Amino acid sequence: MSRVLLAALVLVFVQINMATANQIRLAVTSSFHNSGLSDYLLPHIENDLKFEVHLLVVGTGQAIKLGENGDVDAILVHSKPDEEEFVKAGFAKHRRQIMFNEYVILGPSSDPAQIKLSNNLLEAFKRLSTANTNFVSRGDLSGTHKKEIEIWEKIHFKPEKIGAQYISVGSSMGKAINIAVAFDAYILSDKATWLNHKNKGHLVIQFEGDQLLHNQYSFLPISKNVHFHVKSKLVEELEKWLVSGKAKKLINSYMVQNEKVFTFNAN
Amino acid sequence: MNEILQGLVQAFWLVISLDTELIAISLRSLYVTLTALLISTLVAFPLAALIVVTRFRFRRVVIAILNALMGLPPVVVGLLVYIIFSRSGPLGVLGLLYTTSAMIIAQTVIITPLIASVAHQSMRELWADYRDLLISINTSKPQRIGTLMWDSKRALITACLAGFGRGIGEVGAIMIVGGNIDNATRVLTTAISLETSRGDFSLALALGFVLISLALSVSFATHWFGKTERGGLW
């Protein structure tokens, strides 16, 4: 029996080594995937570069952790302070801006907190802090969650003070929206995920268009100095592709429900 | 309610049109869980029989632990397997993380105690009847184990089905160690989770119905091959 097991184990390793030679792993934020952009770009990438890109769809917090552990070859995330720290700690050689979209505040169509009337984002959040309405928070230290925390801090308010109506769900963007739909709650979301989301319920975009809601996505290749096994060459090719003219054209022309959602801004 | 109907219709069309992605995902689900099941039975059955026919000091403790491990939370198993097979973990050099092999390992850990416990329980009762006979005709230990396993085969099949059920519907562990990668480690349960997060409930439900029918067909196939409930066989 032990011989059979050994043979099976060898077989497994052979199979894996054959499979992993021509592929890289990229941890991406759930919004990049839930928005549908990854499904739109990947066939082009694999066709042009002739290798497979395996996507791990996680929150920014987890993506960074996976990068630190060397379980992925590169990460595509959206939380600038974390990214800079990541580079500073030596896990990535550099941080490359790729594109941006924007965050929006979703809320019930009746808008009980009246945030539609706000002049700016901070005012909208102030109204939310006193309005006695449900608010769903990602609660998973993802880029979106970090953005939400940043805004609360800017108005010097601890969201826990809202009490039971502050619902921290610890889920991906899409699942958090599902919960917000069920609770008729307000929620901070990136616009692309929302437009591509099928279960919209009574929620609508109640506030958008503040420069604080800018959502920058960056590409960070894991440094070979820290994890010698990363496929730096393939990652470099991918990075070149992501900042190329073709990527620019594809990203800028990606539409969800007739709306352009991502803007290419690689430098 | 409307979504359940839509889900049924969509499941029907997915199956009828032989959707290639659906077939690949379903086969991967089967591959992962059946392989895990095979390894589990190779470990669990002899282990259970051994515990039945031998008396040793911490036997009771071992049995209690085995029973308790039936409730091992998959998400914890997933996390442990992740930490072990992560590039920064002790077995990271193997590069097994985010492959179906890692998923098989995680499911094997989850299923084995369950199968061993069920198998142990049924063989223990049989042993009470067989003990005097098997000892009086001077059988060796492997012979006793063989007899017990053969004569409790129906119960062992039930143990397998329970293990299969726990594995095929499991999502917590394989999501962590498999990563739900398209065309590589996506299986039915993780695909359902993904479609739910996209708010596409009818597609998620359709996949769910496919999963249920898969489990049903495996169960039917087992009974058909085992020729249970037929004629003079009980």
Image (spheres, rainbow, N blue to C red):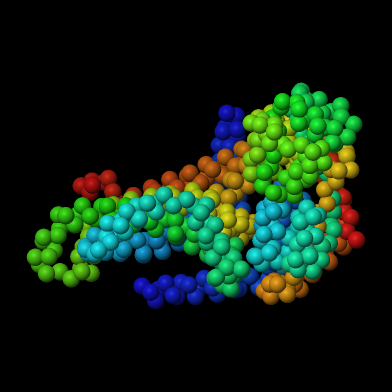
Where in the figure is residue A244, as x and y percent of width and height? 87, 62
* B199 displayed left or right of A114: left
Q: What is the number of callouts on the image?
A: 0
In this picture, is A125 found above or below A256? above
Q: Position of residue A197 (x, y in %)?
A: 72, 40
Please name whichever residue, B181 or B222, is drawn nearer the observer in this view of the structure: B181
Q: Is residue B48 above or below residue A3?
A: above
| Left or right placement of residue B89 versus residue A129 in this view | left
Report whether residue A109 is seen: no
- Position of A267 with respect to B94 (left or right) is right
Q: From what the image shows, is residue A258 above or below residue B49?
A: above
Q: Could you say which quadrant of the image residue A221 lies in?
A: bottom right
Q: Residue at x 78, y 53 (%)?
A: A79
Foreground of the two, A34 or B75: B75
- Asked whether residue A142 is in view, the answer is yes
x, y percent for residue A106:
76, 34
Query: A82 or A180: which is nearer to us?
Result: A82
Horizontal and vertical percent position of residue B127: 19, 57
Question: Which residue is most to the front?
Answer: A156
Residue displayed at 83% across by 51% down: A216
Q: Residue at x 87, y 29 (%)?
A: A118
**Residue drawn 63% across and 47% down?**
B194
Quadrant of the frame with the N terminus of chain B: top right
Residue lying at the far left of the rendered structure: B136
Locate residue B113 relative to residue B52 in the image: left or right.
right
